[in-house]
């Protein structure tokens, strides 16, 4: 008896309980599943290590390009300010047009396209092109960042590993986000933020398997990066704290200003990018060069801080080395420089410019508020850090990532309340003024239709309670005889009724089926004993309505029961109810 019970657990559906042939088939299937799961986790670690090494080389390459093209001194030569970005822009244009056409853009949308369109495949040539062109662009002074390219480089490495291992299609679709998390974590030196961003904006969903793989790859890449570059965070964070609750008003104001600035920034990219692309084809060769020339002009006129990623200048803003007026000017010029860089088709990311604008704007708003409201304590480091999160939430529209990014960078959880308050205001204002997030704008400009994670989060979800109808028909008790149930049918004139089984099960029976039981001479038998093997799954009012679709085509009536009492019927749903609700919802 014990052997039969154990055997019945393993045997596949449709096989006899006593068929010994079920053992090897089922065990092999289980072994294959667990083998693939383990292999994917091991590959995630391997991808993280490779991505970390690639990002380290990428960071060194950017620094070498900066030293070689702009010089190693703090005072940049005027000749280099003009010639380095201009000539490099010409070289980048030639490379992008003739050698690496897929290297354009930031890299985030390209990774999403690999996931949803190309089954996880990204040509490795794209990683090489992204590495070379982005290092040249950022190193020569273009206002772009290394994080987004690092994300795509990691995704390309993961795609190459997955293709070499001949993974299944489902696994290949997930391998690119695993590499993306590794690349972004290495660039940020912040594994939690990288994991959240990839899940929040690239995958849009998560399971235990996905989360485990993404976390392992991110941690592995960060370990490698810290081995070569040290464990220090991007910025030297001074002590930050919230002294009085009334200061939250000042952070709310920062959130409002940051939300408006995010809309201006995103709106500028959305407006200028298609217009630059509509210009004559020959202009594609000189657009990066003209953008580089104008950025060099900004640096020559007194704001070289806007050139490149600008991490060192964010650090200076955090430590209060600039006046609030100059910080506001730098924020505006950084928006302009980034617009010129990105819309010209120069490869590079928007993460670092977003953080730069946020840091400068936050410290500027904090300094101005302190002048107007001197009773509020002013810490430029606190306002700069909160400002980073504000722009991240408003411009990139990743509210959860923006909070944890600031926490990881600062290492101080006392700042969490100002960050949440300011980020919430920025996100709500940015969403209200510009409903379409910037990554979705860029995707649609490229002629692609990728899923919008923000739109998915905001979608109304139909639930079973939206389609169910009240249980007005009588319910037959499973202990009632077939003849008693037939009399109930005569009284109700229904074609099908629900049957309550013991102890908690449900079934249903139709008029024709009941007549068949009577013709077979089973009129005196309890109806429940005849239906015991045919349970109808019970739904709950809060279940998504698509769950009902799994059952309504097999059963005429599906019960909706109370979670606290599975014998209490709160509603009934049929196939017609579900389809009509979807039809009405589509017309709303």
Image: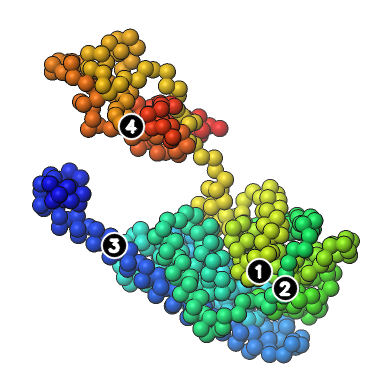
Q: Earlier in the sequence, mark 1 or mark 3?
A: 3
For mark 1, what is the residue?
Answer: 412
Q: Residues within 10 Å of mark 2 (few under 14, many from 20)?
A: few
Q: Earlier in the sequence, mark 4 or mark 1?
A: 1
Residue for point 79% across, 75% down: 320
Asked whether the beta carbons under mark 3 and mark 4 sit within 8 Å of each other, the answer is no
Asked whether the beta carbons under mark 1 and mark 2 sit within 8 Å of each other, the answer is yes
For mark 2, what is the residue?
Answer: 239
Asked whether the beta carbons under mark 4 and mark 1 sit within 8 Å of each other, the answer is no
Q: What SS does tag 1 mark? A: loop
Residue for point 60% across, 87% down: 64
Question: Do we see residue 423 in this rendering?
Answer: no
Residue for point 52% across, 80% down: 225
For residue 446, which quarter of the picture? bottom right
Give the alpha-carbon distance from disc 4 to disc 1, as whole Å: 51 Å
Q: Earlier in the sequence, mark 2 or mark 4?
A: 2
Q: Which mark is residue 34?
A: 3
Give the alpha-carbon distance from disc 2 to disc 4, as whole Å: 59 Å
Q: Earlier in the sequence, mark 1 or mark 2?
A: 2
- Residue 190 lies, in percent from the top left, at 56, 71
Residue for point 29% across, 27% down: 501
Q: Residues within 10 Å of mark 3 (few under 14, many from 20)?
A: few
Q: Earlier in the sequence, mark 2 or mark 3?
A: 3
Q: Is residue 98 left or right of residue 79?
A: left
Give the alpha-carbon distance from disc 1 to disc 2, as whole Å: 8 Å
Q: What SS does tag 2 mark? A: loop
For residue 247, which quarter of the picture? bottom right
341 and 525: which is toward the camera: 525
For mark 4, what is the residue?
Answer: 504
């Amino acid at each position: 008896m014990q052997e039969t019970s154990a055997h019945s657990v393993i045997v596949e559906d449709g096989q006899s309980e006593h068929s010994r042939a079920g053992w090897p088939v089922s065990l092999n299937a289980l072994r294959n599943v667990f083998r693939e799961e383990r292999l994917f986790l091991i590959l995630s670690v391997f991808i993280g290590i490779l991505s970390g090494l690639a990002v380290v080389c990428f960071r060194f390459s950017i620094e070498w390009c900066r030293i070689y093209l702009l010089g190693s001194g703090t005072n940049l030569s005027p000749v280099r300010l003009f010639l380095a970005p201009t000539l490099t822009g010409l070289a980048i244009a030639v490379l992008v047009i003739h050698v690496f056409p897929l290297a354009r853009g930031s890299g985030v949308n390209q990774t999403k396209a690999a996931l949803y369109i190309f089954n996880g495949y990204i040509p490795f040539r794209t990683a090489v092109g992204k590495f070379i062109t982005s290092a040249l662009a950022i190193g020569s002074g273009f206002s772009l960042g290394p994080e987004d390219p690092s994300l795509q480089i990691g995704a390309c490495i993961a795609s190459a590993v997955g293709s070499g291992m001949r993974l299944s299609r489902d696994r290949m679709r997930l391998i690119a986000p695993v590499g993306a998390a590794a690349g972004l974590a290495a660039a940020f030196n912040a594994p939690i933020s990288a994991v959240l961003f990839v899940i929040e904006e690239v995958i849009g969903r998560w399971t235990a398997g996905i989360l485990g793989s993404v976390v392992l790859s991110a941690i592995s890449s960060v370990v490698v990066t810290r081995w070569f570059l040290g464990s220090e965070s991007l910025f030297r964070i001074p002590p930050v704290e919230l002294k009085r609750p009334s200061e939250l008003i000042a952070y709310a104001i920062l959130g409002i200003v940051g939300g408006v600035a995010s809309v201006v920034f995103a709106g500028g990219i959305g407006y200028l990018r298609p217009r630059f692309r509509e210009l004559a084809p020959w202009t594609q060769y000189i657009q990066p060069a003209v953008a580089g020339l104008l950025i060099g002009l900004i640096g020559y006129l007194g704001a070289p801080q806007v050139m490149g990623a600008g991490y060192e200048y964010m650090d200076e803003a955090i430590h209060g080395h600039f006046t609030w007026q100059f910080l506001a000017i730098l924020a505006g010029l950084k928006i302009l420089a980034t617009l010129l860089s990105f819309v010209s088709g120069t490869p590079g990311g928007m993460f670092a410019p977003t953080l730069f604008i946020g840091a400068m704007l936050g410290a500027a708003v904090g300094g101005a508020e302190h002048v107007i409201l001197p009773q509020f304590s002013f810490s430029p480091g606190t306002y700069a850090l909160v400002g980073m999160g504000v722009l991240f939430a408003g411009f990139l529209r990743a509210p959860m990532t923006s909070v944890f990014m600031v926490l990881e960078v600062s290492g101080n959880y006392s700042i969490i309340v100002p960050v949440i308050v300011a980020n919430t205001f920025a996100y709500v204002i940015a969403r209200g003024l510009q409903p379409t997030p910037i990554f979705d704008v860029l995707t649609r400009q490229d002629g692609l239709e990728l899923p919008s994670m923000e739109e998915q989060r905001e979608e109304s979800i139909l639930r079973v309670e939206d389609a169910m109808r009240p249980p007005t028909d009588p319910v037959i008790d499973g202990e009632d005889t077939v003849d008693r149930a037939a009399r109930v049918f005569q009284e109700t004139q229904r074609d099908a009724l629900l049957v309550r089984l013991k102890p908690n099960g449900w079934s249903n029976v139709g008029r024709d089926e009941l007549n068949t039981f009577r013709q077979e001479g089973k009129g005196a038998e309890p109806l429940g004993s005849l239906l015991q093997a045919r349970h109808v799954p019970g739904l709950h009012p809060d279940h998504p309505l698509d769950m009902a679709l799994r059952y309504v085509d097999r059963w005429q009536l599906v019960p909706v029961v109370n979670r606290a009492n599975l014998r209490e019927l709160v509603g009934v749903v049929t196939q017609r109810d579900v389809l009509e609700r979807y039809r009405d919802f589509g017309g709303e």
